[in-house]
Amino acid sequence: MQKRTYDRKEIILIIFISAVILAVGVFLKFWQEKKPEEAASTQVATGTVIKIQTPAPKPKATPNPTGKIATFLQGPKSWKEKREWSGEWGKEYYDGGSFGGFGCGLCCMANIYTSLSEYRCSPVDMYKYAKRASMYEGGGAIDWGYMKETMTKAGFTCDVGRKPKEYASFQSMMKRSKACIVVVSSANSTCYWENTPGHYVTLFLYDEKTDKIFLADSGDPTHNRHWVSLKKIYRSLKTANHWQYMTVTDYDAKKNTWKHNSFGGNCVLPEEWRA
């Protein structure tokens, strides 16, 4: 068989056709690789929902409600140790009486005013205001009537009462209250307080799930700012006292005739309260 020879034009044509075929092959391969992506784009365009896995958002930290609760301490030992919420008032005398001995009720009132209003005060500020706002003469423990009158003029809705016969009634009262001042005594129960003839403490943030309440105890730093069984509070209420509690169920800034906004006297405060 005679071998065919190609002239110059035929060789150029063959090279051209080969280049075209190679280019088409490269294009088809590229098109096949892009096809899934283009198909996905078409699906999006036609309204098909494509699930894209994204990282789950980090849960936001739940703010601690106790951070907004003031819990003043009343005594000289706490001030000497420079405990948070203690003040120089603990070693001072007012109208002949030692604040460390009689100031528990005024600490309770200052706790409520500072925690539940947009204003703030120290126990010694509250002492001075109570003398102006009520018939309280100072120098000793403040009575229920003077506490209620003072807190009412500071914008709070308050009510005093006696220990309910049923524990469930006491629980219901705590659910409805923003805060509560109670008087406790080891003469009624030593389940939490010992050697305590009579002492005012403040209660906040009743937790129905655990049946516990946040305690502000100005007389005992080991009790202060602790969650305590509400039943222990109920058992410890001083029934020899004419009244056992004063609930705070509301606050109205328009009725606040005081509007005090500073901490009088030298004191040790948590960092977030120092501004």
Image (cartoon, helix red, strand yellow):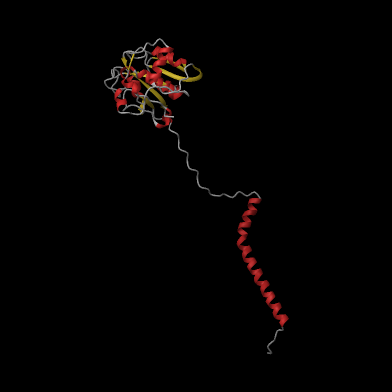
Residue 258, how many percent across, how many down?
47, 17
Would residue 181 be visible to someone looking at this image? no
Q: Answer left or right for 120 relative to 21.
A: left
Residue 199, quarter of picture: top left
Q: Answer left or right for 156 relative to 4.
A: left
Extreme-bottom residue of the structure: 1
Extreme-top residue of the structure: 135
Residue 9, how many percent across, how many down?
73, 80
Q: Quadrant of the C terminus?
A: top left
Extreme-right residue of the structure: 9
In the image, residue 100 above or below residue 27:
above
> So how many labels did they put on this image?
0
Q: Quadrant of the N terminus?
A: bottom right
User: Looking at this view, is 188 or 271 the one in front?
Assistant: 271
Residue 174, how many percent across, how many down?
42, 22
Residue 121, quarter of picture: top left
Residue 224, quarter of picture: top left
In the image, residue 1 above or below residue 168:
below
User: Looking at this view, is 177 or 9 the one in front?
Assistant: 9
Q: Residue at x 40, y 16 (%)?
A: 128
Would residue 16 be visible to someone looking at this image? yes
Q: Residue at x 30, y 26 (%)?
A: 80
Residue 19, how many percent across, how many down?
67, 73
User: Looking at this view, is 164 or 205 the one in front?
Assistant: 205
